[in-house]
Structure formats: C-alpha cells, structure tokens
Amino acid sequence: MKILVFGDSITQGFHDDDMGGWCNRLIQYTINKTVESGFDYNSSVFNLGISGDNTNDLMERFSCEVKARLSDCSDGAVIFALGVNDSQYELRSNKNRVPLDMYKKNIEACIKEARKYTNNIFINSLLSINESLLMPMPWKPTHGYKTEFVDQYNKQVREIVKEQECTLIEMSDVFGDFPEVYLPDGIHPNAEGHKRIFERVRGELERTGIL
C-alpha cells in the first residue's frame, strides 16, 4: 500500500522537534511495522507536504505527483490535509487567500484525478488555531487567520466528503478544549500536538483497513 499525504507546513512537520511531524511519525510507524513483520507487511507513506501550500498550489503539482507514485500501484491511498492556508486572509480587504468556492473546486478536481488510481481517499478537516497570535501573523503582518474562516472551510470539507463519498478524518477537536497548549505560534503544533494528529490519522487508517 502506498499512502500519499498532500499538505502544507503542518504535514511537512514544522515545530515537531522530536520526530519531524505527524506524517513523518506515520512514515516511521509503517517502517517499524514492516520490519517487525519480517517484511510480510509492506506499506509506504509519502510526505508531500510543502510549507505555505494552498489548494491552488496543489493543483499545479497534484497530477504529476500522484501519477509518479500510483500509476504502477495496485493498492494506494491519498490523504488531503490542506485548507488553513486557503482560509488565510488579507487584513485590509478581509479576503481569503483562496475563496471558499475555489477551494471546493480545487479539492474536487484533485479527487477526480486521484480516482484514476485509487478509491481510498481521505480528507483531514482543518485544525483549530489560536487566532489571538495570528491577527496579524508575525511572519506576514499584512495577513492573518480567523477561527470564523477556519470553521467555514471545515463546513465545506464536510460537504465535499459527503458529495464525493470520501472519508473524513476529523481534526477540529484533536487538541481538546485547550488548543493553545499545542500551538506555540498559533497554527503549527508542537511535538505533542503532532503526536495527537498522528494517532488520529493512524486510528482512522487502521479502522478502514489501510494500515
């Protein structure tokens, strides 16, 4: 099984000083499982997260990325873990970086492309943020993030999952009632936050027979 994970800096692993992020934890988990089974078990996870990516960026690379890894594969899965950068907004105009309707079109186009190779398609909902640290973003003072916008994109995610018959991996509650504990800069999880994401994703992949 080849498992392709498309995402942004959170998928890439920012701020997990212990193990390099939730996706890299998933990679290590499958490697350990493969070795411990004497190579009877064999799954590979590909971390395709790129810092700063939104779904417009994903559209530019998705087709070649998925074809390169799944065209000769009889068993694969795709996980989409994007959206928070789409929801980012310019403070002056209050406009999102990628409008909600375009976000939907982009994800649906990528799902259509992915289905050329697999029907195992998962979408992570957006994580909670601590907007008090992100209005504005310290590293980009002209822009920010709002919980209000994150909630709107999460609503869209759930509609896409229902319409496209994909599997939702619910992330909005993964940090419990105190998300600020896991978000030192307001958006990127610390090591414990990444561990929680990994455990949620692993659990859903095991439940559906992917891992």
Image (cartoon, rainbow, N blue to C red):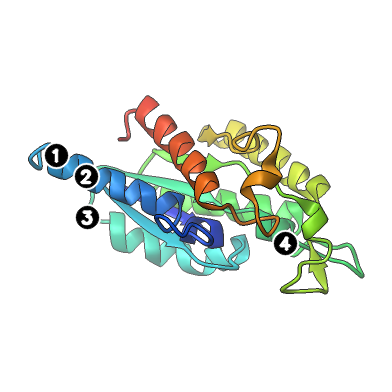
- The quarter holding residue 198 reads top left
Q: Residue furthest right?
A: 92
Sequence-wise first label, 3 or 2: 2
Quadrant occupied by the N terminus:
top left
Nearest to viewer (mark 4 / mark 3): 4
Q: Residues within 10 Å of mark 1 (few under 14, many from 20)?
A: few
Distance of mark 4 from mark 3, alpha carbons?
33 Å
Distance of mark 2 from mark 4, alpha carbons?
38 Å
The residue that mark 3 highlights is 72
Q: Secondary structure at mark 4?
A: loop
Q: Judge whether 66 appears above or below 126 on screen.
A: below
Residue ID at (10%, 42%): 39
The residue that mark 2 highlights is 32
Sequence-wise first label, 2 or 4: 2
Q: Is residue 76 left or right of residue 190?
A: left
Distance of mark 1 from mark 4, alpha carbons?
44 Å
Front residue (pair 111, 123):
123
Q: Is residue 194 left or right of residue 45?
A: right
Residue ID at (48%, 35%): 200
Q: Residues within 10 Å of mark 3 (few under 14, many from 20)?
A: few
Picture coordinates of residue 122, whole percent (x, y): 48, 40
Viewer can see residue 201:
yes
The residue that mark 1 highlights is 36
Residues tagged 2 and 4 counted as in contact (Cβ below 8 A) = no
Q: Amino acid at mark 4?
A: Val
The residue that mark 4 highlights is 98
Sequence-wise first label, 1 or 3: 1
